[in-house]
Amino acid sequence: MNRIQIEKSINRAVNAAPQLSFDELANLPYVKMAEHDFITKQEEIKFPAHIKQIAFATACCFLVMIFVSGWFVQNRVSDSTITMDVNPSIEIVTNKKDKVISLIALNEDARDITRGIDYKDAKLKDTVNALISSLISNGYLASDKRSILLSIKNKDSKKADAILSSLDETIKESLVSQNITPAILKQVIPKEKENIELAKKYHISEGKMKLIQGILASLDQYTLDMLTPMSIEALVELAEENSIDLRNLLGYGVETDDDENNGNEDQPYEEDNAHYEEDSDEDKDESESDAEEKGEDSHQSENSSIENNDDQDEDDDQDSGNDDDGDKNNSNEYDEETLNQNNQEDNKEEPSSNVRNESNEDNNEDSNSNTDTDNNEDSNSNTDTDNSEDGDNNEDSMYDSGENTESNNDGDNDIFVDYNSEDEDNNDYIDTRNQSEEDRNDNNDDNLTGDNEDDDGNVSGNEDN
Amino acid sequence: MYAYALSILKNHEDAMDVLQETYLKIRGAAHLYKPMGKPMAWIFTIARNLAMSKLRLRNKTENMQVEDMENDLSFSYVSDNEDKLILQAALSILNIEEREIILLHAISGFKHREIANSLGLPLATVLSKYQRGLGKLRKHLKELGVQE
């Protein structure tokens, strides 16, 4: 007998039973209940008491975990890693609120600096101030030792920049109050395993290691072992001696208070050190002497344009970074080139492009022997003047499209107008300029020695001319 | 509902009493019913509580013997002997849960899932008890020589 047959049999048997009459049932009296009794009570899904307790405890644990993890992320997870190098290398790890989590001395010198500093949960600025004070008191920072390398590692580049800027201000305030003008190098460093391992090996910061590697890329004669013990001051000097542009190297530049004094607040990361300042002063003196040379009152506007040109050239030089030398060579090249043109050309209608091509060949040789001095910037302005003297727009455009693009563009227009209007006078002036140019080139060689007296002599020589 | 009461009480008269009381209880407490998605489960709970109450009461007052109970499975109203034999076998050899499930499946036409929801049992339990009950019943009928 199968399942269906059994079920059918049971069904037939039960259905054979006498049924209740629905009408009778409907007419039966019933009592409307005020509340459920044990028969009609609805069964609610009830959890055992211990399960409720466990669930409550679990929920509490979750809440606590959420709060603790939130607090931990905010306060104990490292957000930025800042390294400060003078010669002591110090690593500061901060949380999201810019409070210090840990302060690590990366070398022996740094241990003396960090000893006794209460950094836990202190503000980054306060800790840096304390470190600066300690660096000064230990003699690592003084008026002649003023270079500091600030490096930061942070996923958020905007925040990294903001922290660097605020630290920069803090350090400046702190040092200026001690009559020390700081030279602060800043950089944002990425996470690089190799760099970290190398830095650990040499007991220096990653930032300093990056700086050293950048310098080594330009200087083959040095090794890591030679450069790692050097202070930042020494490294900066080495870079300057070898014309390595630290601004390009680090992404930021060397910033000193002098920038602000010179009104360069709008360009906070411009490289600005003593050498640059001296050079720009000399240039201005020379340009003034050039102006005196020209003498005539009719050239007043020209003088101002030359000065402007100087300023622009300085900016251009700074902007162009490592290309400074090349630009200066080029400018010298154009200078002599155009002077030769002017000497040779009697007829201004002669196609200037031909003249330019010829003189280019000659002057390329000369330019090879040119030296890199800032006086060249002055001659650069002369170049502009001489170019404009040709009065040939085609030639101007040729200069524009040439190698020395920006510096020539800047000053050309003003001087161009002046000289077009006074061609005759300018022929005399050009002769004079050629002589003074020769003198200046002599002086340029002298300037290589960095002797300021030579510059003075140069100026006076120009005046004589 | 009658089949359900019968499966518990194994007696037609008691099942009819429980069926009537269940109806009256539902009418009296319908306004107190809180919808919880399973009205049939509430009705079956009432019927079960009444049947169990009836069973306890009967055991106390009448103090009936097992033999009397067996005699009570007369089902004289069933004309077909084979059907009567099968119903008696189902009520006598199966345990209470197996009876509930097999009778509900056979008479009401509930599916196993619906039986599980109404009785508040897991579906797997319902299926296994159904199969086991049928197996026992088939074996018993075979022993009795009932063959189609």
Image (tube, coloured by chain):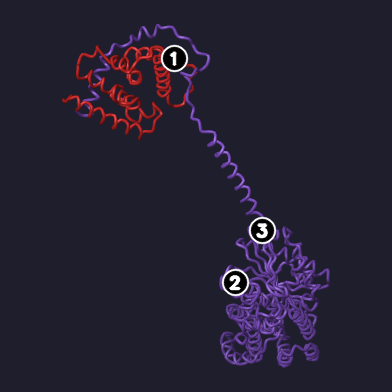
Q: Is residue A269 visible?
A: no
The colour assigned to chain A within the rendered structure: purple
Q: Chain of mark 3?
A: A
**Front residue of A286 and B138:** B138
Q: Are marks 3 and 2 in contact (CB under 8 Å)?
A: no
Q: CA distance from mark 3 to mark 2?
A: 20 Å
- Amino acid type, residue under disc 3 in the picture: Asn
Determine the residue positioned at 50% across, 30% down: A46
State the residue position of label 1: B25
Which chain: red?
B
- Amino acid type, residue under disc 2 in the picture: Ile
What element does badge 1 sit on?
A: helix
**In the depicted structure, whether residue B26 falls above or below residue A450:** above
Q: Is residue A370 visible?
A: yes
Left or right of A420 on screen, residue B87: left
Category of crowding for the residue at label 1, using alpha-carbon neighbours closer than 10 angstroms: few (below 14), some (14–19), many (at least 20): many
**Among the two numbered marks 3 and 2 on one chain, the one whose residue lies closer to the N terminus:** 3
- Residue A465: assigned label: none
Category of crowding for the residue at label 3, using alpha-carbon neighbours closer than 10 angstroms: few (below 14), some (14–19), many (at least 20): many
State the residue position of label 3: A95
**Front residue of A435 and A215:** A215
Determine the residue positioned at 55% across, 39% down: A55
Q: Position of residue A419 (x, y in %)?
A: 70, 81
What element does badge 2 sit on?
A: helix
- Residue A196: assigned label: 2
